[in-house]
Amino acid sequence: MEIKVERVTRIGGEASLHLEVRDGYVERGEFICNAPVRGFEKLLVGKNPFFAVEASMRICGICHASHGIACCEAIEHALGIYPPRDGLLLREACGITNRLQSHILQQILIMRDIFKEEIQENVLKLLFESLETCNRILQILGGTPTHPPAITIGGMSSGVPESKVQRLKQDISKLDELLNRYADVFMDEDNLSETSFLMKDMKFGKPVLASHLFYGDRFNIRVDRVSLEKENQHSTALSARYDGKVVEVGPLARLRIYRSFHGDSLFDRQIARVKELLLNMERLKEVMEEVDFGGVVRTSELPFRGGKGVGVFEAPRGTLIHMVTLDDAGYISSYRVIVPTMFNIPVISDAVRGTPVRIAPVIPRLFDPCIPCAVHMVRVR
């Protein structure tokens, strides 16, 4: 029996789920991205690198800062420049806050599936207050709560004004308290739904890939080992492989590599994401202690010239790769983006196998796919 979930709801973007079912269980599944294609990489050809930072952030309205940082890293690598320490710390703080934004939003989207109905209203209020606080933090750090304009080539275009430092620290302290309250609710099994327990009993694992726990490091992965494939003739996205193999990226991958996290159930992806909320809060507080708010945040010289560069950043959903080639005048001659969801598309398709058909639409939400990021890949004829 074939079942088509034509619109997987409560995810970022448009996707469908095609299932082959026998006796109420999924024998085979395909997760298919079907949002319209956008040509961001072609859009950047011939443009100034500063435009690339602004444009690449618009690839996504959720992981915007992650794209901006990866783009800056790629261009800085091509130009052979390195931002000052305080600029890098503030850039990292923007990336962490963006990850917190995204993880909180994912909790909101999956909340109806994982919690008992009687506590959902209170959980939702807690999460919305957390998201509002997180947005204020990014506005102070980056200039706006989405597509933060302070992220730029060479570091940050501006630091945090002295008049806003105290408010920033107050909001960080408040967010820390809110997320710890949420984690307590989540970790209490009495609050979890039947669907959560079903997913806890289902084992699922793939090889994992991550470059860093918080920021990203192009030296910790081999970008030349990443290949792209057309997963399905009906899909508007390509999928990515590492060493020719399907690999999982994201919170579980990061914690497995850098924190010895050993969970092997489907539900452990949600546990990993909640653990990342707390880990990233701790790192954000550390950054606030390390940064000199009056320090230099941008390199003084930007020598535009030809070159090739790679930027790798750990976006909320996993390893994000930007690759750029600049011509002799410093303009972009080619651009390539490989996003986390491209790695996780075949993982999601495999993860639904063996699940009761009634909970199959929940499984993609565990991976928090971002379809707008994944469908920008296109060959223009």
Image (spheres, rainbow, N blue to C red):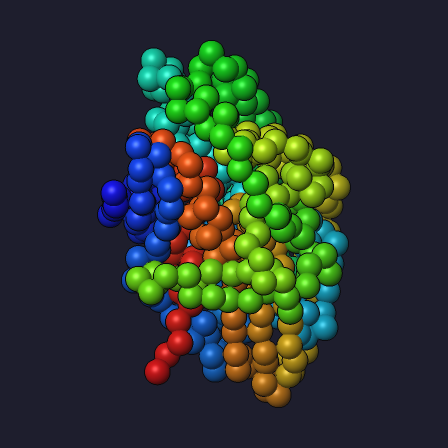
Image-based side of 130 in relation to 85, left or right: left
Task: Tell me which residue sits at (33%, 65%) in the image.
Answer: 233
State whether residue 346 is above or below residue 49: above
The foreground one among 272 and 322 is 272
Q: Quadrant of residue 106?
A: top left
State whether residue 142 is above or below residue 57: above
Q: Quadrant of residue 40?
A: bottom left
Q: Where does the image place residue 366, in percent across and percent down from the top left?
A: 45, 37
Task: Tell me which residue sits at (38%, 53%) in the image.
Answer: 371
Image-based side of 102 in relation to 87, left or right: left
Q: Quadrant of the C terminus?
A: bottom left
Q: Where does the image place residue 207, in percent across and percent down from the top left?
A: 61, 48
Image-based side of 299 in relation to 317, left or right: right
**How many numbered callouts?**
0
Task: Tell me which residue sits at (56%, 48%) in the image.
Answer: 248
Image-based side of 229 in relation to 78, left or right: left
Task: Tell me which residue sits at (25%, 43%) in the image.
Answer: 1
Asked if residue 261 shows in the view, the reply is yes
Asked if residue 362 shows in the view, the reply is no
Q: Where does the image place residue 150, in percent across and percent down from the top left?
A: 55, 56
The foreground one among 77 and 207 is 207
